[in-house]
Image (tube, helix red, strand yellow):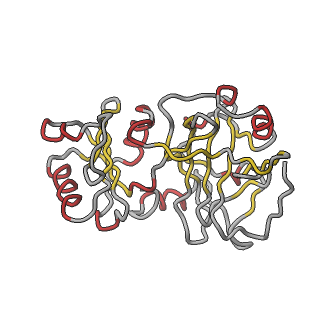
Amino acid sequence: MAEKDYPAGHSTDSSWYAIDECGHVAACFTSESGALPENAVEIGSYEEEEGSIAFWNGECHVVETISSEHVGLLAKTFSGAHRDPKYGVEGLFYILTGLPGELRPFLLRKEGRPTADPIIRMAGKHAIAVDFGLGAPALAFYEKVHALGLCVACTSAYHLSGSRVGKKGDPVFSYGHPSANGAAWPYFLQYAPQRVKTLEGLSISKEERKALRKGIVIPGCFRDKIFWQPADDFECTFYSDDTKPISVDTEDFKGILRSPFGYW
C-alpha cells in the first residue's frame, strides 16, 4: 500500500473502498464532509511497479442494473418524499407504484433512445424511472406521474449512481454522502447491483484483492446497511477538526432524514 498523508481534515471529495463480512465490495464517496476511515483503500492508493492502480472502472446505468430488492427498500424508506423538479438540475429519479399503458413507450429497450426521454424499467412490484431531461418535458413527466398517483418517491438523479470496478466493469455496491456543509452524516447506500459478485469473483488482480482485504472490512452485509456511519466502526478523518459524526440511531439523524434536502 502506498503511504498516505492525511491532513487534519479532507477538503476535497475522496473515493474509497470497503468490503463486508459477506465478501462484497462497496465504492464509497465522501462528498465534501463524509468520514474517511484511516485505513481505507482509496482510488489510486495501491501501487505496483507499473504505477498507481485505480480499481474504479466507471459508472453503472442505475435503471439497467439496480437490484429490485434495493428499489423496494428505497421505496419503504423514502415513501412520500418528493423533490421539487426545479432542483433536479441533472434530472430526477422516480420510484413508481406501477406502469400504466401511457408510460410503456418509455420502457427500457436495448436500442438507443434520446437522452431527453425518461427511461423506465420494472423492478419487482415497482417501476423505476430516470428523466434526464430539463425544462417543460421533464416538468410534464413529473406532473403526470404525480397526477396519476404513481410516484412513491422522487429525487435528484445524481444522488443515485452505480459503480464498476476491474477489467470487466463489474458492478459493486455504492455509498454516497449527501452533505457538503461540514456535517459528517451517515453514508447512504445509493445502489445495490442486481447481480452481486464477491471479492473473489471480481475482475481484479490478486494484488488488488489483497489490498482490499487489508483495508476496511465492515461488520455485517452492505445489503442490510442502507445508512452507515464509518466513524462508529473505525478511526476516521473529517472535513475539519470540529466535525462531529452523526450516528444512525440518533434524533439528529432522524431529523435529517425527514428534511426535504437531506438524503432524498
| Total tally of numbered discs in the picture | 0
Q: Quadrant of residue 132?
A: bottom left
Near-viewer residue (139 or 164): 164
Question: At which x and y percent is residue 259?
Answer: 42, 63
Query: Which residue is at a point 84% across and 52% down the rendered structure image?
Result: 2
Q: Quadrant of residue 99?
A: top left
Residue at the extreme front of the image, as rendered: 50
Near-viewer residue (251 or 134): 134
Question: At which x and y percent is residue 156?
Answer: 38, 58
Judged left or right of residue 219, residue 132 is left
Judged left or right of residue 161, residue 108 is left
Position above or below: 30 against 11 = above
Which quadrant is home to the C terminus? bottom left
Question: At which x and y percent is residue 56?
Answer: 63, 46
Question: At which x and y percent is residue 222?
Answer: 59, 37
Judged left or right of residue 101, residue 244 is right
Query: Which residue is at a point 83% across and 45% down the rendered structure image?
Result: 48
